[in-house]
Structures are given as structure tokens and as C-alpha cells.
Amino acid sequence: ILLSLPNLPHESIPDGASEEDNPEIRQWGHKPEYGFDPQSHVDLCDQLSLIDFARGAKLAGSGFLLYTGWGARLERALIQFLLDLHTREHGYTEVSPPFVVSPDCMTGVGQFPKFYDQAYAVQEGEDAETLGKLYLVPTAEAPVANIHREELLKEEQLPIFYCAYSPCFRAEAGAAGVGTRGMIRVHQFDKVEMIKIVPADQGYVELDAMVGNAEKVLQLLDLHYRVILLCTGDMGFASAKTFDIEVWAPGQGSYLEVSSCSNCEDYQTRRMNLRYKTREGKNVFPHLLNGSGTALARLFVALIETHQQEDGSIRIPEPLQPYLGVEVIPATS
């Protein structure tokens, strides 16, 4: 029964019933203005052969993407850029985890038992009894947050910062017709995840820093965004406090969530029995934080829609140019 109960919200969380009640904390930059009608990422991807939506669906069904040419190169460049930024400038240690995890790992981060129906189960071998013993990761949080599961750390080992790339698999990608055209809601997408394991008295200072780490990505890519504080009715199952970062996508005419940064306090560390021994000899559950640094599909959307040119080409932000090797994705790619 206890495993089915959500975390308690932090005292600073505003009451609310849905995302409509989430207060905006701040904005950065401005919505870009064009001397032409900006195209959607779907049209840009078709014209520049960045993503083959039809063949992606042929390979695996609706909600799966086939990146091609400059699209595949841009996706790879973004992953490398994000990992380098977080490891070189933000102090994270890169790890490369398995892309499947045990039910214990899913339970530890709060995915199970609530979200069984959203997970892709993997069958081991031919024995049907093994079905469901491993699951495709819904986020790198599932394996990385569990690295120290059932361990007793020393206080001097904290804080621990990890970042990791993984594909993310979500069986429930959204109702048909609700943002399902293109890349907005998909069953598989790439993401770079940030994880922090910190003493309880540092949890909220480190949460603010983590939000800043994710914001830095969008600032370097010259993308307008806003930061939202989630109200009680919109918070995640395991979170005590969550900030969402939403980037502006001109072709959509709307903001898209590209990062969600949460302090789960000791909710997850209790579930996974992760503790640390203080200098006074007391065993304590640390705070565990997770954040998207960031999700790639929607970042890809915002980047190509924001930096599209009138001739149909895509301008590449300067920090990303060394990874892609060009300043512009040409209109005739």
C-alpha cells in the first residue's frame, strides 16, 4: 500500500487542480519575429529530409522516428553538446547505463506500481514466465538514480552528480490527435538526464542549480523559454517540488516542455534503501534530484523552428557549430 502513495508536496508548492494553475517564475529571451510565416517542424523535416516520419512508422508503428541525413547528425550533435556542457561546466560525472532495468529499479524511482501500463516489458529468452522482468527505460533516471541503491555511503562522498544519455521509451505517448503529429508526442525519444544525490539540507539549493543547468542549454542555443513551478494538482508522483522549463516553438505557436527538474527529497532513497552515514555516525536518507538536461525531440523541434530562415535553411547556433561542422543546414539538403 505504501508503494502506491505519492510523495508529499513541499510547503512552498501552490495549490492547484491542473497545469492551468501553475505560476510562471521567469522568462528568458523573446519570441522571435519573422518577415515570413514560420513553418512547422513537420514541414521543415520533410523539405530538408531531416526525419522520415512515414518510414519510421513503417519500421515500428506510430510514434517512432527515423532520423536521416542532417537530421541524424543534428540529433547526435545535440546529445554530445549536452553531455559536454554538463560534464565540463556543471560538474556532473558522465555514466552510460543499461537501457533496460529491473522492476526494483522502476519501483525505486516511483515508476512502479503506478505506471506499469506505460512501461515496455522485455521478455528474456523463450520462457514466458520471464516476461516483464526487465523494462525499457522510460528515462535514464531509472537506472542512474539506482546506481547506489541499497548502499550506505559516507557523508564525505556527497554530493554526487551524474549525467547520462539514453533513449526513452513510453508506451503511452498521448491520445490520438493530441499533439501526435510530428515529434511532439512519441514513444521513443533521446534525452540527457541529470541526477543529484545530496545531503537533505542541500536539496533545494541544488534544485535551483539544476534548473539553472538546464536553462543554460537553451540560452546557449538562443531559444526563448519560460520556467514554471508545478502546483499540487500537476506534480509528478515522486516529486516534492518540480520546475518545468518550456521552450517556445514558433511553428507550433506554443511552449513545449523540454525539461522537468524535481527534488524528490528522501521519497526515492527510502524506496531504494539508499543512505549515508553522517560524521556523527547517524544513518540518513539523502535527497535525490532528477532533471532533464534536456529532452531531445522537443529541443530539436524548437531549434529548427526558431532558427529557420526564409529560404528554408536552418541557422545553427554558434556553440553547436563545432559538433555539426556547419553554420547552416542548407535548404537543399
Image (tube, rainbow, N blue to C red):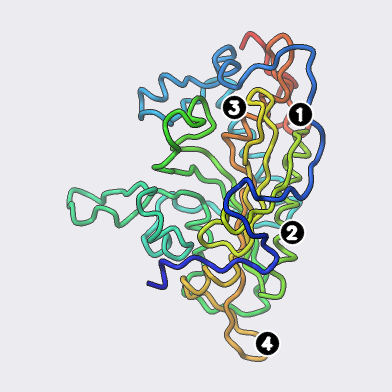
Toward the viewer: 329 or 303?
A: 303
Q: Which residue is mark 1?
A: 317
Q: Which residue is mark 2?
A: 208
Q: Residue 73, labelled with which disc?
A: 3
Do the CB atoms of the residues marked 4 and 3 lie less than 8 Å apart? no
Q: Secondary structure at mark 3?
A: helix
Of badges 2 and 3, nearer the viewer stands: 2
Task: Give the Cα distance between marks 1 and 3.
Answer: 15 Å
Tally of marks: 4
Q: Secondary structure at mark 2?
A: helix
Residue appearing at x 53%, y 39% in the figure: 190
Q: Residues within 10 Å of mark 2 (few under 14, many from 20)?
A: some
Do the CB atoms of the residues marked 2 and 4 lie less than 8 Å apart? no
Residue appearing at x 68%, y 87% in the figure: 279
Residue 114 falls left or right of residue 330: left
Toward the viewer: 313 or 18?
A: 18
The image quadrant of residue 116 is bottom left
Q: Residue 279, labelled with which disc?
A: 4
